Image (cartoon, rainbow, N blue to C red):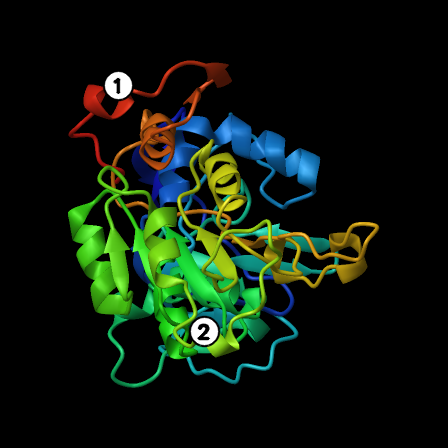
């Protein structure tokens, strides 16, 4: 079959073997496949993905000297089945699925794998029990957005927002937009969203953001602070005498950029503006006793939910960390570089790259 193959940090079109579906697997034909920002980054920095996978136990361990057929945001059509399958969906049925194979030997990735080609090829094999039939009336191209939309929806579900929580979304790429849509579905408000791209800010409004901000002009955290005050002071918690008012609602921050340095900048800024929360990362409840000092006074604890990646539709990540960091920390004293954090003034950083918007 023909496929767009990652070979030597380039994409080339060539022939590869047709994958044979194993027990419990289906053979499907790719109808549409999105180009994820993770694919763009992997094309240039695959060795980092492999290194991180080995350290964390993720299934994205690949031999970069061999061919790799990426693509995990897809809509496909059922062609055939392997042995030990139920065959509930007829051949020709349009489907989406998680890009993984669940086998007796463990979980294997589809796309970030030498053995399991993804949606950049004509055919794929998928786990039958993970297939989701595309509803009637939904176009194939929109169905291919299921995976990035599911990332945002899952992130919001993991956050377990409460009625007083005020969300802030950093980055309005496809995953950030999916987070905004999921927040709107559960009635969260106000939703503050930030991105350098005017087009993405407009899309954020269309998806349900109540307020959007350009980080070059204003800090997203200051914008959040202006909207996070309790509308009814009677419902606001009483602040300790050493904390200035007004009382702000708990912050839940979604980092949807996925560029080195952004998580650090978010954490540094939010510590000063998030007033309280009893959650650890990824929305899991923390031991509230650990959030108190010896006198039993609850210290401010920020609520975090860190989306693992962003899907960008163009450009590489070169230069982005510096821009995001300078825009969010106009009074900061550190500068993020590709090598790490180094001492430097940020005063002229935004002026150095006035036209470089995050893709």
Answer whether residue 122 is visible to the viewer in this image: no
Residue 69, percent from left and from top: 42, 43
Residue 177, percent from left and from top: 32, 60
* Number of other residues with Cα within 10 Å of mark 1, as a class: few under 14, some 14 to 19, many 20 or more: few
Q: Residue at x 30, y 20 (%)?
A: 347
Q: Residue at x 52, y 62 (%)?
A: 250
| Sequence-wise first label, 1 or 2 | 2
Q: CA distance from mark 1 to mark 2?
A: 40 Å
Q: Identify the residue position indicated by label 1 in the image.
A: 348
Residue 322, percent from left and from top: 36, 26
Q: In the image, which is nearer the foreground, mark 1 or mark 2?
A: 2
SS label for mark 2: helix
Q: On residue 171, which mark appears?
A: none
Q: Quadrant of residue 324?
A: top left
Q: Identify the residue position indicated by label 2 in the image.
A: 233
* Number of other residues with Cα within 10 Å of mark 2, as a class: few under 14, some 14 to 19, many 20 or more: few
**Marks 1 and 2 in Cβ contact (< 8 Å):** no
Name, please, the residue furthest toward the right. Answer: 294
Q: Residue at x 51, y 77 (%)?
A: 235
């Amino acid at each position: 079959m023909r496929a767009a193959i990652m070979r030597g940090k380039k994409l080339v079109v060539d022939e590869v073997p047709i994958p044979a579906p194993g027990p419990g697997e289906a053979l499907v034909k790719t109808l549409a496949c999105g180009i994820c920002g993770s694919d763009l980054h992997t094309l240039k920095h695959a060795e980092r993905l492999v290194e991180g996978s080995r350290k964390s136990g993720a299934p994205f361990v690949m031999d970069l000297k061999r061919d790799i057929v990426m693509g995990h945001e897809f809509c496909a059509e059922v062609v055939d089945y392997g042995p030990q399958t139920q065959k509930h969906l007829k051949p020709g049925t349009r489907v989406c699925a998680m890009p993984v194979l669940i086998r007796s030997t463990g979980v294997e990735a589809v796309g970030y794998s030498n053995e399991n080609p993804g949606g950049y090829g004509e055919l794929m094999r998928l786990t039958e029990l993970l297939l989701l039939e595309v509803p009637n009336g939904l176009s194939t191209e929109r169905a291919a957005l299921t995976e990035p939309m599911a990332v945002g929806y899952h992130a919001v579900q993991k956050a377990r927002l409460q009625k007083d929580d005020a969300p802030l979304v950093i980055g309005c790429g496809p995953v950030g937009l999916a987070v905004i849509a999921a927040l709107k579905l559960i009635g969260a408000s106000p939703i503050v969203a930030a991105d350098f791209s005017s087009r993405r800010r407009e899309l954020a409004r269309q998806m349900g953001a109540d307020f959007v901000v350009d980080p070059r002009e204003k800090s997203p955290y200051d914008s959040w602070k202006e909207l996070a005050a309790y509308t009814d002071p009677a419902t606001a918690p009483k602040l300790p005498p050493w904390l200035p008012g007004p009382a702000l609602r708990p912050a839940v921050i979604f980092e949807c950029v996925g560029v080195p340095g952004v998580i650090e900048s978010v954490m540094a800024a939010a510590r000063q503006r998030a007033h309280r929360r009893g959650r650890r990362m990824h929305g899991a409840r923390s031991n509230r006793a650990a959030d108190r000092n010896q006198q039993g006074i609850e210290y401010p604890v920020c609520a975090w939910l860190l989306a693992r990646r962003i899907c960008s539709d163009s450009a590489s990540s070169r230069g982005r960390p510096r821009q995001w960091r300078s825009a969010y920390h106009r009074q900061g004293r550190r500068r993020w570089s590709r090598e790490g954090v180094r001492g430097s003034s940020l005063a002229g950083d935004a002026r150095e790259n006035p036209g470089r918007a995050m893709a």
